[in-house]
Amino acid sequence: MQMQHLPSVVALLASCWTFCDAAGDWCYQSQFTCERQCNAPEKWNHANGACAGKSQSPINIVTRKTLKDERLTPVEFANYQQIFRGTIKNNGHSVQVGVPHLSTISGGGLPSTYKAVQFHLHWGNNGGPGSEHTIDGEQYPMELHIVHMKHRYNDLVTALADPEGVAVLGFFYEMSNSANRKYDPIISALRSIKTTNANTSLPPTSLAQLIPPEHNLTSFYRYKGSLTTPGCTEAVVWTLFENPIPLSFEQLRAFSELKFHDGKAMVGTFRPVQPLNGRRVFRSGSAVVSVSSRLLMAGLAMALGLSRLN
Ligand SMILES: *[C@@H]1O[C@H](CO)[C@@H](O)[C@H](O)[C@H]1NC(C)=O
Ligand SMILES: *[C@@H]1O[C@H](CO)[C@@H](O)[C@H](O)[C@H]1NC(C)=O
Ligand SMILES: [Zn+2]
């Protein structure tokens, strides 16, 4: 009985693989089916060879292996309060908002001043795990990427030819009990861009409105990596902030209402974590290290005990 079924199973698998090998476009793992011809993340190097590079993103950050770097002073934000009327678009892989190149970042150990170009998000399924980077193996429900390019460039293509041409600020989200009203304009706009290539204009907003206040952004991680979608260009200085942005379950769930090109739910829009290949991950002075912070507490308790004895 078993043996009779075997050949048909093998034939089915073989035909599926043949389809996938012939594919041209790229997709997330959540989109992969035998019927759909697309390259899931393990095959993104078919879409672009750079995706098999040695300095790819995202990564898992093992906090106890990060190196404290005193040069990682707080990032200086300029014109992040600037109000703009952006266009929010379902681009078939994410939602993306182009921003006027007026907001800049500098300091924080960045090699240059960078200006904001666009922001987009990566998320899971109905508030489930969906961030690209993970911290000590924890995957957050969503991750915001604010993409910047070096001040002297005028387009991303040129900036991507410079190994430090692009700086991306990454922010994690966490589920909260109450809605984050600052996100109402974006969440409401999602209703109008459910289908791929749909776009709509956002009510006046600013980048500062989307991220935690500056005094909550002093703890971050820094490493050199790549774009997390094909071409996977290794030209990105990454900054990942420890302090997450709160959103309610309903707000997170709204992103899963969007549709991929084929009409299926746009969920699981993250690339799996990539090997470090010997790269160093740095942390700012105040970023937390999970294990040693516990040791510090133990040390503190001991010190207190000793002082009492004295
Ligand atoms: C938004 O959609 C309109 C109508 O489909 C189109 O003409 C316009 O180019 C789109 N804008 C963007 C930024 O994609
Ligand atoms: C800012 O940080 C404080 C202290 O860690 C925290 O209580 C507060 O919720 C944070 N605020 C935001 C908006 O992240
Ligand atoms: Zn991204």
Image (cartoon, grey):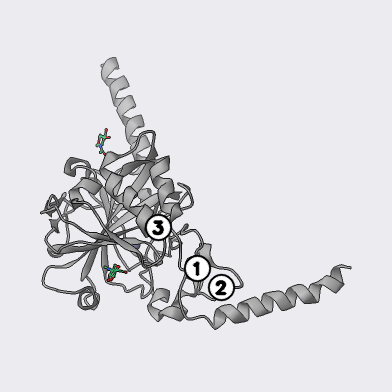
- Compared with 98, 157 (above or below) is below
Q: Nearer the viewer, mark 3 or mark 1?
A: 1
Which part of the image, by quadrant, shows the N terminus? bottom right
Q: Is mark 2 within 8 Å of ligand 3?
A: no
- Compared with 50, 205 (above or below) is above
Q: Amino acid at mark 1?
A: Asp
Q: Amino acid at mark 2?
A: Arg
Q: CA distance from mark 3 to mark 2?
A: 23 Å
Residue 235 sits in which quadrant? bottom left
Helix, strand or loop under label 1: loop
Q: Which residue is mark 1?
A: 262
Q: Return the residue found at the far bottom.
A: 22
Q: Which residue is mark 3?
A: 132
- Compared with 146, 27 (above or below) is below
Q: Is mark 1 within 8 Å of ligand 1?
A: no
Q: Is the C-beta separation of discs 1 and 2 under 8 Å?
A: yes
Q: Which residue is mark 2?
A: 36
Helix, strand or loop under label 2: loop
Residue 179 sits in which quadrant? top left
